Image (cartoon, grey):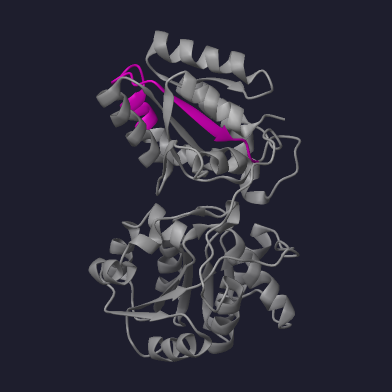
Amino acid sequence: MIDAGAFCKGLEAREFDLFTGVPDSLLGDFTACLSDPKESYEHIITANEGNAIGLAAGYYLSTGKYGVAYFQNSGLGNAVNPLLSLADEDVYGIPMLLIIGYRGEPGVPDEPQHVKQGKTTIPLLEAMGIAYQFLDENFEEQLDWCKDYVTKHSSPVALVVRKGTFDKYPFEKQVDNLPLTREDALEIILDSIEDEDLVVATTGKTAREIFELRVKRDEDHGNDFLTVGSMGHTASIALGLSMGSSTDVYCIDGDGSFLMHMGSLATVTDKAGANFKYILNDNGAHESVGGQPTVSRKLNIELILQGLGFATVLTAETDAEIKEALEKMKSSGLCALVIKTRQGSRKDLGRPTQSPQQNKVALMENIRAGKE
């Protein structure tokens, strides 16, 4: 395994000294080092991966030094456009290092949303003409190769990170003095909505907790769409679902997902009917991949949601406040609810035992049955 501290120092010594990207579980120890208050790395967590490519490009233009853009391989999709239309040597020719977490590596068991990403990661890099190596314990030589490559070719280069590459690096999560965890809030929501209402849950622990809460409550999963990937697109999925449904559709989003593709909510509010209900769980972190902070606690999210077109925006932190807000939502037209929660989840939290295809079929059959 690689010592994350030594790896970060090695990058900095080779003028790779701006670190920016979206947290990933395979890169958690690397980003924990970057966030260590005892260190002084220039580290910026971005809303999405394309932001990181743009930041690294601008940094190179102003300093002549190289940025490091890190993300999970699923985020390569968000980065394709700026990599090919901005950084590529056939356009501006902007050098930078990509550090990519290799989820769904063929032959390594992983969750269903990562399987296709794993199969296509290396072919995609090759199709884009991005040279790469798999990061290993010879990282000093690999960093020399990266520095030499970006200097000669003035284009991006990549290090692909397999599971278990980095040694553990201590990371202290932000802890808020708030009464509820996300799972607490989700249980209150399920208690308060109607039996026929539909739920679209964002990727990560939100979907996992809703699945297990349904099991605990001896309820089936036919009213839920448990988004296992597609971070940032939950609201768009819920809008499409609401267009074909006469029941209320509750979109349960997270602050990381909200920030990743915030602009999509402008389209949602322009087209959504009164049966579209938006609930934003804001715990200030990318908790599902390790707890790195988002910028949500520095923003006036309620004002942003109003500006995006929600007629009514409610806030809640306690059990009673959530229940009261949900009652108002039922008759408030186009409405959003922001629930502030603290980080934290059960150590024994499992994953859905239904496949994504089974979830899809159950939901569609349930909707069809309701129309008959």
For the N terminus, the image quarter is top right
- Name the foreground residue: 96 vs 215: 96
Residue 108 forms part of the magenta stretch: no
Q: Could you tell me residue 25's position as x and y percent?
A: 61, 46
- Name the foreground residue: 204 vs 183: 183
Taking the view exactly as shown, the residue that stands out farthest to the left is 307
Q: Could you tell me residue 191's position as x and y percent?
A: 58, 87
Q: Could you tell me residue 106's position as x and y percent?
A: 71, 34
**Image quarter of residue 272:** bottom left
Picture residue at 42% right of the left edge, 66% below the top: 240
Asked if residue 274 is positioned above or below residue 299 in the image, the reply reads: below
Picture residue at 48% right of the left edge, 54% below the top: 293
For the C terminus, the image quarter is bottom right
- Name the foreground residue: 255 vs 166: 166
Q: Is residue 9 among what the camera can see?
A: yes
Q: Is residue 372 among what the camera can see?
A: no
Residue 102 forms part of the magenta stretch: yes
Taking the view exactly as shown, the residue that stands out farthest to the top is 152
Count of numbered tags: 0
* Relative side of 202 to 156, left or right: right
Picture residue at 47% right of the left edge, 85% below the top: 322
Asked if residue 97 is positioned above or below residue 141 in the image, the reply reads: below
**Image quarter of residue 339:** bottom left
- What's the magenta region? 82-103
Q: Could you tell me residue 55's position as x and y percent?
A: 33, 35
